[in-house]
Structure formats: C-alpha cells, structure tokens
Image (cartoon, rainbow, N blue to C red):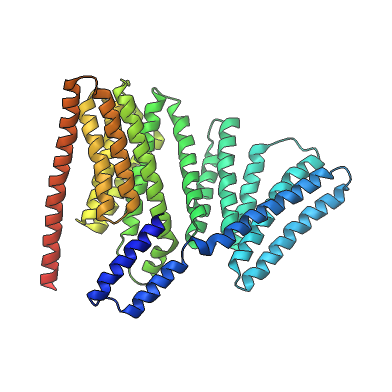
C-alpha cells in the first residue's frame, strides 16, 4: 500500500521537477522504470519458491515418519546427513554462479532438514527430551549456515529458534544466569550483524523481536523482586523504545562522508529505521495502556523502581541517545520534534506510574506526545510516524471522551484540555517553522 502511494506521489513530483528543469525527461524515465521494477512482483517467485521449499522439507519428514519401522537406522542417519550436505553444496555452487536467490533457498532447505533431523536422531537413540537445548542447538546451526551461505531465510529461522529458546528457557529456568545473559546478547549481535551485512526485512524484524524478548524477560525477572510488577514493566517498556528511537534517529542523521557514509546508508540505516518504527509502536502502545490504568486508579510506583537494573540500563541508553541526537543534528526541526515527542511519551508513562492522580496533566501530556509523533512524521516525511501519531491521538481522545462523557463538566474539561494542547502545539510548530526558514535564508545568503 505504501509503495503504491509513494509511486503516485513520485510521478506527480517528477512532473514538477521536469518543469523546473531539475530533472531531464530521460532521467525521469529511468527513475520511474527502476521504481516500477522494484515493486513486490519481482519478489513473488522467490516467495512462492520459499513456500515450496518448506513443503518439500515437510514432505521428506512425513515420508520418513510414515516409514519409520521399515527404514534401517543407518539409512535414516545417512539420508539425513547426505541431504544436508547435498543441499549446502548445491547452495555453494549456486552462490558461486551469482544465483543468490537459489543459494538462499537451498541453505534454508538444508537448515529445515537439519531441524527435522535433530528430532529424528533423538527418537532413534531414545534421548531425553530437552526442548530448550534443542532450540539453542538449532539456533547455532541455522546461524552458522546463514553466515556461511549468506542466507536471509536461514537467518529468519535462526531468529525464530532463538526467540523460542528464550521462551522455553524462561519457563524451564526462571532465573537468568550470567552466562545465559551474555549468550543472549551475543546472539542478538550476531543476528543483527547479518541483518546489516545482508539486509532483509525478515532479518531486521527478527533481531528486533529477539532483542525485545530478551529485555522483556530480564525486566520481568527484575520486576518480580519488587512491588507493582506491572508498573516496572511499563516503565522499562517505555524507556527502552525511547532509547532505541533516539539512537536510531541519530544514526540515520549522522554526517558521514566517503566509505563511512556508504556503510551507514546500507543495512545499518535500514535496521535503524525498522528498529525505530517497531519501538514507536511499543512506546505508543505502552502510553495508551498506561493512561487507561491511570484513569482506573493505579497505585503509585515507589522511587526504588527506577533503580531496577534493566530500567537503569534503558534510562542510561535513552540519555545517551538524546545527547547523540542533539550533538549530530543541532537544531534540526525534525530531530527536535522526534526528541520532544519521545520524551513527552516517556514522561507521560513515568507520571502514570509515579503520580497517577494527576489525570488531567497526564492526559494533556499524552495527547501532546501523540500529536508530536504525527508532526515529526510530517516534517521528516515518514508516513509510518504520521499514521502512528494520528492513531494514538484518536485512541487516546476516544478513551478520554468515553471517561468524561457522563457529565457536561467532564465534557468541558476534555474539550478544554484537547483544545489547549492543539493550540499550543500549533503555536510551537509555527514558531519552529519560521525559525527554520530564517536559518535556511541565512545559510543561503552566506553561501
């Protein structure tokens, strides 16, 4: 949907650029052709082939299971090993010929056979069930194959199995040991590095989800040791997304030149943008849920909750991200709006968990934060931010209206708060835009 909107807007803009002499008609034709060739239709064969590979792997597993008693043990093991080796050899030959798509599918097929083979080997030798260890072993196997074969599909399998390992480990061994924590961080870095070197949407979302699962598990374990577990979780899941958004925005706006700029503008920039978008969804969701709980009369969170280790780490990262963003962008309007909207969202959640009785102030700050997100999206031309901000404002406004609709006085308070917030944001935006315009005029005059 967003690709189609972008193409329609690009066609309209190119006509204007041609009229102004900025782009020649020949160059405009090349641009439109490149955009049209890069749509989802070019990825359709690979997507269909990926589903086909999964079906073939499942067919092999079902065939072996159906003939379990008839197939000798040596044949089972040899068949599994040869299939994995043959698939990897085929993938290597395809990669050598430049057929990256086929190599990716072949590596993924080998990984699927490896996954099925683990369970079959366990049944052959009647090994005790260890789903947690099995998930971790699958993660290592898929991760190694993904790096050796440059396979994006196999990395998605590695991320999925790593998330499964985290969930199973949380159920089997609630305490998070030091070694397990370090291993979790190593897996995040290894999967994230693959997503940077070999960019793919599945890889990016896989490592982002894994990072939040690891942090969420750490946060839950820390919260269980104190009072008001839900308040600590809300605090941590607002501060960490804020830190990710600020750091990601700073990375995307770094002033780099030469090889450093080319490196940043590749997979790292895509990962930063995806992380910022995912974190924005988390932050706005926590903001909405926290505001609902505030109106329902939640108990204040003790100050000691801010000293919980995961919260301290996230707060430190947020402050570092804010400083990094200010140092690299100065008084850039888009960056300022991002910083203001993110900090307003975090401040709203902090007020909910610390002083929930200030409902009117919290509501005003929450509405301002959602409007700020939409404004940041408009100024920086990021449709996802604009849509998310409008969605959050709509949800918050409808919820507040439903809470105050019972009396005329309540309605008056609601519309007064909403009106004052909108007017204040409009005045701030107008002054910011004028200041930005004056700075651009001064720069143009100096040049």
Drawn side of residue 26 relative to residue 408, left or right = right
The vertical placement of 105 against 77, above or below, is below
The x, y position of residue 21, in whole percent, is 24, 77
**Which of the pair 194/116 is nearer the observer?**
116
Name the residue nearer the viewer: 222 or 205.
Answer: 205
Residue visible at 56% across and 33% down in the picture: 170
Where is residue 183 shown, x and y percent of the image?
55, 45
**Looking at the rendering, which quadrant does residue 25 occupy?**
bottom left
Report the residue at 65% width, 40% height from top: 133
Q: What residue is at 61 percent from the left and 48 percent from the top? A: 139
Residue 440 can be seen in this image:
yes
Drawn side of residue 439 relative to residue 24, left or right: left
Relative to 417, 198 lies left or right: right
Total number of numbered discs in the rendering: 0
Q: Is residue 172 above or below residue 203?
A: above
Residue drawn 59% across the image and 40% down it = 165
Looking at the image, residue 204 sits to the left or right of residue 260; the answer is right
Residue 217 pos. (x, y %)? 49, 35
Image coordinates of residue 253 in percent, x first then y, are 30, 59
Q: Quadrant of the N terminus?
A: bottom left
- Residue 426, located in which quarter of the rendered image? top left
Q: Is residue 342 above or below residue 190?
A: above
Query: Residue 132 lies in what quarter of the image?
Result: top right
Whether residue 151 is visible to the viewer of this picture, yes or no, is no
Q: Quadrant of the C terminus?
A: bottom left
């Amino acid at each position: 949907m967003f690709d189609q909107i972008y193409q329609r807007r690009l066609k309209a803009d190119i006509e204007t650029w041609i009229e102004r002499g900025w782009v020649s008609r020949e160059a405009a034709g090349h641009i439109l052709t490149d955009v049209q060739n890069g749509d989802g239709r070019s990825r359709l064969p690979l997507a269909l082939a990926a589903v086909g590979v999964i079906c073939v792997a499942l067919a092999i597993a079902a065939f072996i299971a159906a003939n379990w008693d008839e197939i000798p043990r040596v044949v089972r093991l040899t068949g599994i090993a040869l299939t994995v080796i043959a698939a990897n050899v085929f993938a290597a030959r395809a990669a050598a010929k430049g057929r990256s798509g086929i190599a990716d599918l072949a590596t993924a097929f080998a990984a699927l056979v490896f996954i099925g083979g683990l369970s079959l080997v366990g049944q052959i030798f009647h090994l005790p069930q260890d789903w947690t260890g099995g998930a971790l072993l699958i993660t290592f196997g898929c991760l190694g194959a993904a790096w050796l074969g440059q396979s994006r599909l196999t990395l998605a399998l590695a991320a999925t199995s790593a998330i499964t390992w985290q969930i199973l480990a949380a159920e089997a061994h609630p305490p998070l040991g030091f070694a397990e924590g370090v291993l979790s961080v190593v897996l995040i870095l290894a999967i994230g590095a693959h997503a940077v070197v070999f960019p793919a949407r599945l890889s990016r979302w896989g490592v982002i989800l894994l990072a939040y699962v690891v942090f969420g598990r750490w946060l839950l374990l820390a919260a269980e040791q104190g009072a008001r577990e839900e308040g600590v979780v809300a605090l941590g899941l607002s501060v960490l997304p804020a830190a990710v958004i600020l750091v990601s925005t700073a990375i995307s706006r770094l002033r780099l030149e030469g090889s450093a700029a080319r490196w940043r503008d590749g997979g790292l920039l895509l990962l930063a943008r995806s992380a910022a978008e995912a974190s924005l969804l988390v932050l706005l969701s926590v903001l909405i849920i926290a505001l609902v709980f505030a109106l329902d009369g939640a108990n204040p969170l003790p100050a000691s909750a801010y000293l919980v280790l995961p919260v301290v780490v996230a707060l430190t990262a947020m402050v570092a991200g804010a400083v990094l963003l200010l140092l690299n962008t100065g008084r850039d309007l888009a960056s300022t709006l991002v910083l203001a909207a993110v900090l307003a969202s975090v401040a709203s959640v902090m007020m909910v968990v610390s002083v929930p009785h200030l409902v009117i102030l919290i509501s005003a700050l929450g509405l301002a934060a959602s409007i700020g997100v939409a404004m940041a999206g408009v100024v920086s031309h990021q449709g996802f931010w604009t849509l998310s901000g409008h969605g959050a404002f709509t949800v918050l406004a409808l919820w507040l209206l439903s809470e105050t609709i019972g009396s005329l006085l309540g309605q008056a308070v609601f519309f007064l708060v909403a009106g004052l917030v909108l007017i204040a944001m409009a005045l701030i935006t107008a002054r910011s835009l004028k200041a930005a315009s004056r700075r651009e005029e001064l720069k143009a005059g100096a040049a």
